[in-house]
Image (cartoon, helix red, strand yellow):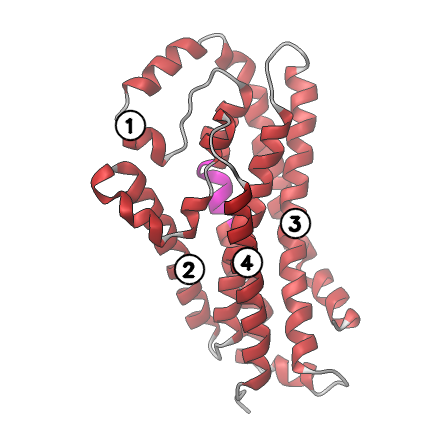
Amino acid sequence: MNTTLYKQMMKVNLKGFMNFAIGSAFYILLMFGLYPSIATSASAIDELVKAMPEGIARAFSLSGFGSAEAFISGEYYGLILVLILAIVCVQVSTQLMAKLVDQGSMAYILATPTTRGKVAFSQAAVLVTGLFMIIAVTTLAGLGGKAWFLGDAYAFDTSRFIQMNLMAFLLFFAVSGISFLVSALSNDEKKALGISGLITFLFFSLDLLGKISDKIDWMRNLSIFSLYRPADIVKGQGDILVPCMVLVAIGIVTFALAILLFRKRDLPL
């Protein structure tokens, strides 16, 4: 890895990472702050959730509001956090590779005493570090929100909350790897952004549609988002080890391919 490049690109992107992290932390604290008032009518809301079509509840990870982590899962981890991290992965991966090639800045970086492999690895490390920062701040904010707003008055399973954050990180480690691969192979910033966004949106849509109806449940098998199931984690259902291993493998393979192919590809003059 080129340490100088890593530090410089972290400095360039740090403000953006922190903006997303602070926004995520603020939102999850808001959810924890709202839960005590929600808990007083949790049973009535649970009945409303049960009255919904099963597919709708599955699609948006609504697992009831009997516990704080169930409420957070449905209101934040099921959709909002997914959208935030999807934007980060697609946007930052494009800025780190395709944008530099498109603007000609990559030629100046490669003119320094370094290699293409080190440049690509350093940029990948920036992306993963930023993703980790957002998840870490979100997790710490959630634990702080639990202590501040809930105390010992409400049930909260900390281990399941941490598992949700781990799964969110690994899902978007895989998504960021795919987006980084697209960016590493692109000469045009807008094209890379469009393709990465389309792939991410397609994966999300296939998973969403598959959850809505059992007749098209097979669509979920085509999406890596099917491995991310916050509602199941809250309920203590299923083993997260295999999904974690699959997501890690996808991320490592796609990042490795991006670095390898970037080393061998022709760059525009």
Q: Tell me which amino acid carries mark 1.
A: Glu
Dot 3 corresponds to which residue?
Answer: 132
Write down the region rendered in magenta.
78-85
* Residue bearing mark 1: 54
> What is the C-alpha distance between the residues marked 2 and 1?
29 Å
Labels 3 and 4 touching (C-beta < 8 A): no
Q: Badge 4 local density, few (<14 within 10 Å), some, or many (20+)?
A: some
Judging from the image, what secondary structure is the residue with disc 2 in?
A: helix
| Residue 133, percent from left and from top | 68, 48
- Is the residue marked by circle 1 packed among few (<14), some (14-19), or many (20+) residues within 10 Å? some
Mark 3 vs mark 2, CA separation in Å: 20 Å
Cα distance between the residues tagged 3 and 4: 17 Å
Give the foreground label among 3 and 4.
Answer: 4
User: In the rendered structure, are the residues bearing label 1 and label 3 in contact, judged by CB atoms less than 8 Å apart?
Assistant: no
Q: Quadrant of the C terminus?
A: bottom right
Mark 1 / mark 3, whichever is N-terminal: 1
**Mark 2 and mark 1 residues within 8 Å of each other at the beta carbon:** no
Q: Is residue 65 visible?
A: yes
Could you say whether the residue bearing mark 3 is in a helix, strand or loop? helix
Image coordinates for residue 44, horizontal then vertical, percent: 38, 10
The residues tagged by marks 1 and 3 sit, at their Cα atoms, a distance apart of 33 Å
Proximity of marks 1 and 4: CB atoms separated by less than 8 Å: no
At horizontal 48% and vertical 25% (from top left) the residue drawn is 235
In the image, residue 22 above or below residue 95: above
Instruction: Report the residue at 69% width, 20% height from top.
Output: 148
The residue type indicated by label 3 comes to Phe
Residue tagged 4 = 249
Residues at marks 4 and 2, CA–CA distance in whole angstroms: 21 Å
